[in-house]
Image (spheres, rainbow, N blue to C red):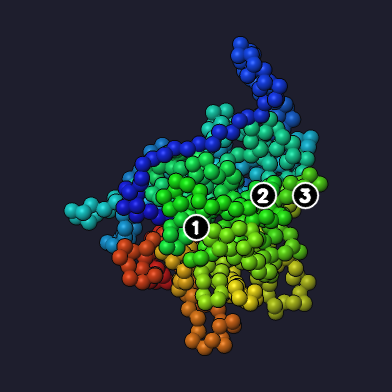
């Protein structure tokens, strides 16, 4: 995200809030502590002894091993904290635009401790982190301008998001939480139990996916915990944000501000009922003014929700988290290609009975470009694929063969070729449209982009979130680099022109214009954002900004691209 300096300076009074999470302790021992204060020391001794016994058990039965990282995967390797700001003004190539706003560009992403992601081997089998895990690290670039001569100073800093579990493992100085997402069912279940017994939590709090702002405060977030408030100047982690104690479950990585009212619409999933709840936080961030259980019969991994001027948009797609499936020997997280998919449209302060559900073609859509009302229709634009990159291939499969075929679109000219697989193209992600008619209940679906570029991680001018817009931007997959790697790499950016043809009869057949800006060979981007021009008169008055890493030189740069001259 990019934050103008005026937004940073207008922060309201700082309030630190935390959620207490008590560690596992036998009920009898809790009772003894209450009745016999003199035995508190004994209780502490008991707990310390129990902890040591459990640690010995884990150290004896489980072996932590590095997950395989080929040299070509250096783009995803962890980096060290700098320990303070570094001035990088002398490294600027080209010219920062005179009307570029002062502010902070900040990216959040996985940065595993102890050299990288881990797997464990044990008598129960193998468990592993999936590729999106790893402790969150904030990378911040600070732009400041000298009003006397117009010169720019640019500073960089990075810092881990210090969640409770980050601090715990940092203090122990070794991997401690057993991986509990991917792998063999018995190994995952044993990891759950042992993590709970030792730490009071079944898994680590990662906070590695996004940074968002509400009411002048800034938060780091991932789906498996509540947000962490951060100081955007120092990157210090200030503590958990539970909305004054009213929100006690995980929190979507992409909350949305309601157009006009500036209330924050949030969503939280859980592995047990209620599977999904939606909340609305007041514009000042001080209270939860609405909370409702959606009464779903499965836990869909909703990564994002949409908003319009009147509605909340819920994506109930067949990527699910299922404890019962895990207990019965299946995966915890699975995309069911035969499962149903639907989109729910719910009045802002509605309940489960007020949701209008629309059945749509099965798909996996992690990110919404935008959603808005258009007459009787609610329009949803997103980046749609036919399979999920999460959790990734089963451990028995070769990920370097599993991914490349799935993100390439199948070539119709090769229908009779024995090399064609039903899995070809399943991960190729298009810009896609759903038109949901609130009066008739009908759905119209269409692709907005063709088969030339696979794209995801969309962004728009934030002033148009929830209302009709003309332009969108996204990261573009480098198909060659991804083929040799087995993981998606984004080698450029795309600009989407959402302009319908004048002839209405052609609208369902046409695809929108796409401009691309591809980077140098072996250079890959992440964390792209749109920076609006202050006082800009048009929607696309602004810049796309992104971190770009060159694997040959192992140097990262930040590109600032004028969106009106996108292809230049």
Residue in the picture at 57% in, 51% down: 291
Q: Residue furthest left?
A: 148
Residue 325 disc label: 3
Q: Quadrant of the C terminus?
A: bottom left
Residue 351 disc label: none
Q: List x then y, in percent, for residue 451.
A: 60, 73
Q: Is residue 388 above or below residue 288?
A: below
Q: Is residue 82 above or below residue 398?
A: above
Question: Which SS class for mark 2?
Answer: loop
Side (left or right) of 235 relative to 349: left
Question: Which SS class for mark 1?
Answer: strand
* Residue placed under numbered mark 1 in the picture: 256
Q: Which label's residue is closer to the chain start, 3 or 1?
A: 1
Question: Which SS class for mark 3?
Answer: helix
* Residue placed under numbered mark 2 in the picture: 274
Q: Quadrant of the N terminus?
A: bottom left
Residue in the picture at 43% in, 53% down: 283
Residue in the picture at 68% in, 41% down: 180
Mark 3 closeness class: few <14, some 14–19, many ≥20 residues within 10 Å: some
Residue 173 visible? The answer is no
Q: Is residue 502 above or below residue 175?
A: below
Front disc: 3 or 1:
1
Q: CA distance from mark 3 to mark 1?
A: 32 Å
Q: CA distance from mark 2 to mark 3?
A: 17 Å
Q: Nearer the viewer, residue 123 or 433?
A: 433
Q: CA distance from mark 2 to mark 1?
A: 21 Å
Side (left or right) of 300 relative to 497: right
Q: List x then y, in percent, for residue 553.
A: 47, 52
């Amino acid at each position: 995200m990019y934050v103008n300096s005026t937004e940073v300076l207008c922060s309201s009074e700082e309030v630190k809030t935390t959620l207490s999470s008590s560690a596992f302790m036998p009920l009898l021992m809790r009772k003894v502590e209450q009745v016999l204060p003199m035995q508190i020391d004994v209780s502490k001794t008991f707990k310390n002894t129990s902890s040591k016994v459990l640690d010995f058990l884990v150290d004896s039965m489980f072996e932590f091993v590095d997950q395989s990282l080929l040299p070509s995967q250096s783009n995803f390797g962890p980096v060290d904290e700098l320990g303070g700001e570094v001035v990088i003004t002398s490294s600027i190539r080209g010219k920062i635009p005179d009307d570029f706003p002062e502010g902070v560009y900040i990216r959040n992403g996985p940065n595993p401790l102890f050299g990288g992601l881990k797997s464990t081997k044990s008598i129960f089998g193998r468990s592993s982190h999936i590729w999106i895990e790893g402790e969150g690290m904030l990378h911040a670039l600070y732009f400041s301008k000298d009003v006397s001569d117009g010169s720019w100073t640019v500073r960089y800093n990075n810092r881990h998001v210090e969640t409770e579990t980050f601090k715990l493992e940092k203090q122990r100085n070794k991997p401690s939480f057993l991986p509990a997402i991917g792998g063999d069912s018995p190994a995952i279940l044993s990891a759950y139990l042992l993590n709970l017994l030792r730490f009071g939590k079944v898994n680590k709090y990662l906070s590695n996916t996004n940074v968002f702002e509400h009411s002048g405060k800034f938060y780091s977030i991932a789906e498996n915990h509540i947000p962490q408030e951060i100081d955007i100047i120092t990157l210090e982690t200030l503590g958990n944000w539970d909305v004054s104690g009213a929100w006690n479950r995980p929190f979507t990585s992409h909350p949305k501000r309601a157009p006009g009212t500036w209330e924050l619409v949030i969503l939280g999933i859980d592995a047990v009922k209620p599977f999904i709840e939606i909340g609305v936080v007041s514009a000042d961030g001080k209270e939860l003014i609405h909370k409702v259980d959606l009464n779903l019969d499965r836990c869909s991994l909703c990564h994002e929700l949409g908003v319009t001027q009147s509605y909340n948009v819920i994506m109930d797609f067949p990527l699910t988290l299922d404890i019962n499936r895990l207990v019965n020997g299946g995966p915890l997280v699975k995309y069911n290609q035969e499962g149903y998919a639907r989109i729910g449209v719910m009045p802002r302060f509605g309940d489960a009975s007020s949701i209008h559900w629309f059945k749509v073609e099965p798909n996996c859509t992690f990110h919404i470009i935008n959603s808005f009302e258009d007459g009787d229709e609610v329009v949803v634009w997103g980046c749609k694929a036919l399979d999920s990159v999460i959790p990734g291939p089963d451990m028995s499969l070769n990920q370097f063969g599993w991914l490349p075929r799935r993100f390439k679109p199948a070539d119709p000219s090769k229908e009779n070729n024995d090399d064609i697989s039903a899995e070809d193209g399943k991960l190729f992600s298009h810009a896609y449209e759903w038109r949901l008619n609130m009066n008739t209940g009908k759905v119209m679906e269409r692709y907005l982009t063709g088969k030339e570029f696979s794209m995801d991680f969309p962004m728009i001018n934030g002033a148009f979130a929830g209302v009709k817009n003309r332009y969108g931007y996204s990261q573009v997959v480098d198909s060659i680099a991804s083929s040799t790697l087995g993981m998606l790499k984004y080698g450029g950016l795309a600009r989407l022109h959402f302009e319908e043809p004048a002839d209405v009869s052609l609208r369902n057949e046409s695809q929108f214009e796409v401009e691309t800006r591809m980077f140098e060979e072996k250079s890959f981007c992440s964390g792209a954002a749109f920076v609006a021009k202050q006082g800009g008169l048009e929607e696309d008055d602004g810049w796309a900004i992104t971190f770009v890493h060159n694997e040959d030189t192992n140097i990262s740069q930040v590109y600032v691209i004028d969106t009106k001259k996108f292809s230049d």
